[in-house]
Image (tube, rainbow, N blue to C red):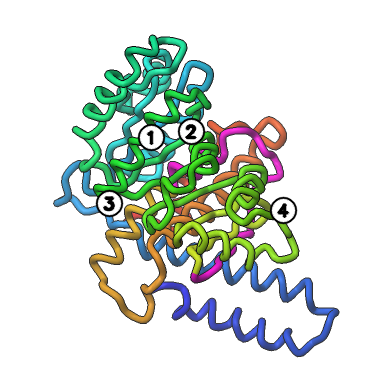
Amino acid sequence: MLASSSSVLRRQHFLVRSLCVGGCGNRKRLHDIRSMACYAEAENILRAIIPPLDRSKYKGQAGKVAVVGGCREYTGAPYFAAISALKIGADLSHVFCTKDAAPVIKTYSPELIVHPILEESYNIRDEEKEQISVKVLAEIDKWLERFDCLVVGPGLGRDPFLLECVGQIMSHARQRNVPIVVDGDGLFLITENPGLVNGYHLAVLTPNINEYKRLVKKVLNCEVKDQDAHQELQLLAKQIGGVTIMRKGKSDLISDGDIVKSVSQYGSPRRCGGQGDILSGSVAVFVSWARQHSSATGVDSTSQMNPTVMGCMAGSVLLRKAALLAFVSKRRSTLTSDIIELLGRSLEEISPAC
């Protein structure tokens, strides 16, 4: 059962209704209580979708995630996304990266399955590009149907040939109904070509404020209006055909074009690079678990929410909790690796393993 039926939320909703008649002096308290209610809802969603640890299950049933990203300059981002997926509970995590990035990523962890199949323009001749593109797609097609979710963008870079190949990979994943979480330079690709995800309800975009501004400018042809943030996000998701968008920020706003959700409790004031990569890997796992949960339970009064929205809410609440725990311990010296190490503890505090 999700949070709307819990006694905690019923009490919070009562307080919200009570404060609504209290005038302007209660606005801050009203906002705080609403934030608590949204956070509690996100935690309850996480508890509902997380699969139980069952001795009868076999490898792969708890999730198989792949990250498409990693180039000569950027090797940390795909590692952060892929290892976060494992730390949360996915059974297998793959990385599809360039040949230059692969040896580096392999040294970070033996837990990851690394595929050095992507190429950048500097490394190939023009006459080779078509042949190499066909080879890359043929190789990744061997794996696509095995994955529960694809993360596209961490550490991808902006090499034109590499982005062209990745666009084709996304199209192939879409044909096979594989959910896609798009982050980092993958969002640059989407901003240039929104048609790659337009109308694909299994796509999730996770822009930060600058990436979001570029997306709004491209799709809505206007500047961001923070005073209309909820309506603007909902309209943007609708205009891209009902994809789910998580606008990251002080409050993470999430919409699939029909509803808008917000997660804003906890979090860390330390904004070290790499937290978005943790989030993309986390959301990939939670989206796959939410889809499994929805398939297993069917549609009832408590589980009608879009699984991609559920996955985003669960990913947001877990990252915020882990980031806060890391900051309490490390303060200004908090690094992304510190947060990753606390994902398991945070998950256990929200949903203890049986």
Question: x, y percentage for residue 13?
Answer: 60, 82
How packed is label 4: few (under 14 Cα within 10 Å), some, or many (20 or more)?
few
Tell whether label 4 touches label 3 (CB within 8 Å): no
Span highlighted in magenta in the image:
258-282
Upstream in the sequence, badge 4 or badge 2? Answer: 2
Q: Gap between marks 2 and 1, in whole Å?
A: 8 Å
Residue depth check, mark 3 versus mark 4: number of the one nearer the observer: 4
What residue is pinned by disc 2?
154
How packed is label 1: few (under 14 Cα within 10 Å), some, or many (20 or more)?
many
Q: Which residue: 33% across, 36% down?
A: 169
Upstream in the sequence, badge 3 or badge 4? Answer: 3
Q: Gap between marks 4 and 2, in whole Å?
A: 26 Å
Left or right: 248 as drawn, with respect to 78:
right
What residue is pinned by disc 1?
67
Upstream in the sequence, badge 2 or badge 1? Answer: 1
Q: Which residue: 45% across, 60% down?
A: 241
What residue is pinned by disc 4?
223
Upstream in the sequence, badge 2 or badge 3? Answer: 2
Tell whether label 1 touches label 2 (CB within 8 Å): yes
Q: Secondary structure at mark 3?
A: loop
Q: Amino acid at mark 2?
A: Pro
What residue is pinned by disc 3?
177
Q: Amino acid at mark 4?
A: Glu
Q: Which residue is nearer to you in this view: 265 or 285? A: 285
